[in-house]
Amino acid sequence: MMNGLILILELSTWACKAASLEENGGVIFGTKTSYFPVANQNTSIPTPPGCSPVMFWHLARHGTRYPGKDDIENMRDNLSRLRDEMIAAWNDGKGNLSSEIILQLKNWTLLPTPEDDKLITTSGRKEHFEMGQRWEKRFDNFNFFHPNKTEVYTSYKQRCIESGKEFMKGLFSAELPLVEDNHLLRFYDYCSLYINEVGESETPCQEVLKFETMPVFKEVGDRTEKQTGVQFSKSELDILWDICRFEVSWFPGTWSPWCSVFSIQDLHVYEFREDLKYYYEDGYAYNITKLMTQPLWHDLITRLEVLQEGRLAVNNSVLMFAHAETLMPFLVSLGLYLDQEPVKASDWPLEDRKWKTSEISSFGTNLDVIVLRCSASQVKGNYENTSSEEFMDKTEKSVDLETSKESEASTKSEESKESEESTESDSRESEESEESENSKIDKRSVDSDESTESEESKELEESKESKKRKKSDVSKESKESKESEESKEPERYKKLEELDLIAGEELKIQIMHQEKITIIPGLGDLIPLSAFIQKYKYLADLDFDKICEN
């Protein structure tokens, strides 16, 4: 009877701890946080009354994945041994682990093999499938999403390709052709300055190293030894932290027995260390991190300018599936999650920090740029969906606009200095640059462009052969052909029909991060199209090769 009571109490204690972890730690695992506790499950219409969608530009990180090959082998080589040491210590009466946790550890096996190297998991597929379903429901009243009006781009990685396929299944109940574009979605691989000064440099790691020498980090080892009866090395604790957070992401709604090694405070310590790492690698520490997002901005601004000219492009939806290293720099380029001062090791615990990777860069993290046509009556922003407060992060409403303007002015001053150095060269190369940019875009366009060019070439040859008989007609055709080549646009940017805005209607932009309406510092949450273009066009107009020169 007593043993049964003890087991009930132990199960109750574990249930309470799991509930505490779910409440405080569901979004606590840095960039390996599952998207499920982050996602906005509200599927009501996010657009303000009087507004309807015109364009949907979706950029998402892949879903939950397995660790890399080296990490899997490291787990395979060490976790069974660590598990056995913890069980032996428990049998000797050491530590505070419950019999339920010990039983779970005894029955535990490592799920992935080295062949699963960074492949997407079942939960990762589900993250994107359900996300697609939610967007279909939100825009269902507008009959907006159509497979024949949608472009899909991914990086070459399997986890991104499969994430895109799952999102489309949720959105369309079908799959569309995907275009791999690594320059667009893995721009960091093509930027020498970033690779040498940030990616392969030890400098960005300095704050992480400082934090690991602080008492608060060393205390994690003391607490885990008291909890398990086993003294772990730093590298062993890193493995335990990884298997804990990975398994929570692989099996949504459950908690890994390995997480019982840590206290809530321990998990926050590791989360802060992760935030430091990515603040300096993919955050605000280096200006090149923002500038190298130029390929994404060129794609977005080009599409927005088509709308600004009063035209509707062939495709109204653009879906892109990439990586954390794609999303975080793009968030930085938008000016989101900027703390007043650079995040440093000495700032611990900095609980109110904006740069918190668990919340802003989980698996499946996503950012949407939605262009709306709004009636004259919809003149204000700060719209809040009345059915759920989750759509609007109210804390962002307290943004000090004056401070953000000063920050913006400082940023523009720095960018202006770079711009002055390249203005003379850019003006001489503007026509060549435009042709080059169009050429890059054409590579991602539909195959019909190649057919069109072939037919135009054939017509031109035929016109030359009949020059003697139809001299005047040939002259006219030649002129038209030249003008066509100079102004040729990729298929996705070609005019489909006039936008035909009614008097008083305006085009507005709504930014959503993690499927929640997001306020852009200095612009608000419902932004005039022209103001958005004006603020960010400089990023689209940068010469990528030039800014990335080492």
Image (cartoon, grey):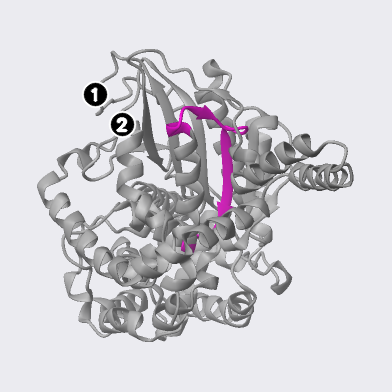
Q: Where residue 138 sits: x, y (%)?
A: 50, 25
The residue sitting at 50% across, 40% down in the picture is: 303
Q: Quadrant of residue 410?
A: bottom left
Q: Nearer the viewer, residue 19 or 235?
A: 235
In the rendered image, which quarter contains the C terminus?
Answer: bottom left
Task: Judge whether 176 appears above or below 34 on screen.
Answer: above
In the image, the segment drawn in magenta is 307-325
Circles 1 and 2: CB atoms closer than 8 Å:
yes
Task: Judge whether 27 appears above or below 470 on screen.
Answer: below
The residue sitting at 62% across, 39% down in the picture is: 492
Q: Where residue 486 sits: x, y (%)?
A: 60, 48
Task: Judge whether 384 appears above or below 284 on screen.
Answer: above
Q: Where residue 213 sits: x, y (%)?
A: 26, 85
The residue sitting at 37% across, 63% down in the picture is: 290
In the displayed structure image, the side of residue 9 where residue 439 appears, left or right: right
Residue identified by numbered label 2: 526
Residue identified by numbered label 1: 380
- Disc 1 is placed on an element classified as loop
Q: Is residue 295 magenta?
A: no
